[in-house]
Image (cartoon, helix red, strand yellow):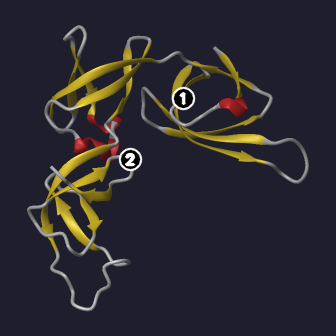
Amino acid sequence: MKINANLIRPGNILEHNGRQFSVLNIQIIQPGKGGAFIAVEMRDLRTGTKTNERWRTADTVEKCSVEEKDCTFLFGDADHLTFMEQETYEQFTVPADLLGESAAFLQDGMAVTVDFVEGSPVSVTLPEKVVMTVTEADPVVKGQTASSSYKPAKLENGLKILVPPFLAAGEKIVVATADCTYVERFKG
C-alpha cells in the first residue's frame, strides 16, 4: 500500500528498489529554502545492511503489509533462534543478529510477537520489561548520595547495566528491554 513519506514511522517495513527495509529512525528536516524532506535510516531485511534515504514529504513510498503473530521462544544458539507459533505450533528459526543486543533477554518459554512479511519473519518484539537476577554488583561507596549515583552491575545474561547503590548480587530486578536500563526492584 502506498503512503506519503511523512507518514513513515520507525518499525514500518518499506519496499524500495525491489528490496524490503525495516525503518530504524526518521528525521524531518525543514531547510531554510525549499520544501521539507524526510531522512530515513533503514535496514535491509535480507542482508542486514543499513542505508539512509531521503524523500520529499509529498513523495509516496510502498509500505508492506505486516502480519503479527504471537509466538513462544523455544531455544537458541550463537547463530539462530527457534520460535514456535502459538496457534499452529509450527516452529521456525531466525538469525540471532535479527534481534541484536536484545536477544540476551530471551528466556525459554517467553511470549514474543513476530512480524511476518510475505510469510518470512522480519522482526521479533520482546516484552517491554523482563525480570533478571543481578549476579555481580560493586559494593556501596560511603558518601555517595542515593538519588543521583548509580553503580555498575552484571546480570545473569552477561549484560552490564547501571543500578541504584542499594542493590546487591542475588537480587531480582525489572529491566526495560528496549534500552537495557534498570526500572525497579522486583516485587514478587
* Disc on res. 12: 1
Name the residue located 19 percent from the left edge and 53 percent from the top edge.
187
Task: Kindly give the residue lying farthest to the bottom in the view shown.
Answer: 143
| Percent of width and height locating residue 111 | 24, 29
What is the tally of numbered marks visible in this picture?
2
SS at circle 2: loop
**Is the residue 45 above or below the residue 136 in the image?**
above
| Percent of width and height locating residue 157 | 17, 51
Name the residue located 54 percent from the left edge and 29 percent from the top edge.
12
Amino acid, disc 2: Ala
Quarter occupied by residue 173:
bottom left
Task: Kindly give the residue lying farthest to the front in the view shown.
Answer: 187
Task: Kindly give the residue lying farthest to the top in the view shown.
Answer: 88
Task: Kindly give the residue lying farthest to the right in the view shown.
Answer: 33
- In the image, taking residue 98 as reference, residue 71 lies left or right, namely left
- In the image, taking residue 34 as reference, residue 156 lies left or right, namely left
Name the residue located 68 percent from the left edge and 30 percent from the top edge.
7
Amino acid, disc 1: Asn
Q: Mark 2 points at which residue?
A: 178
Q: Residues within 10 Å of mark 1 (few under 14, many from 20)?
A: some
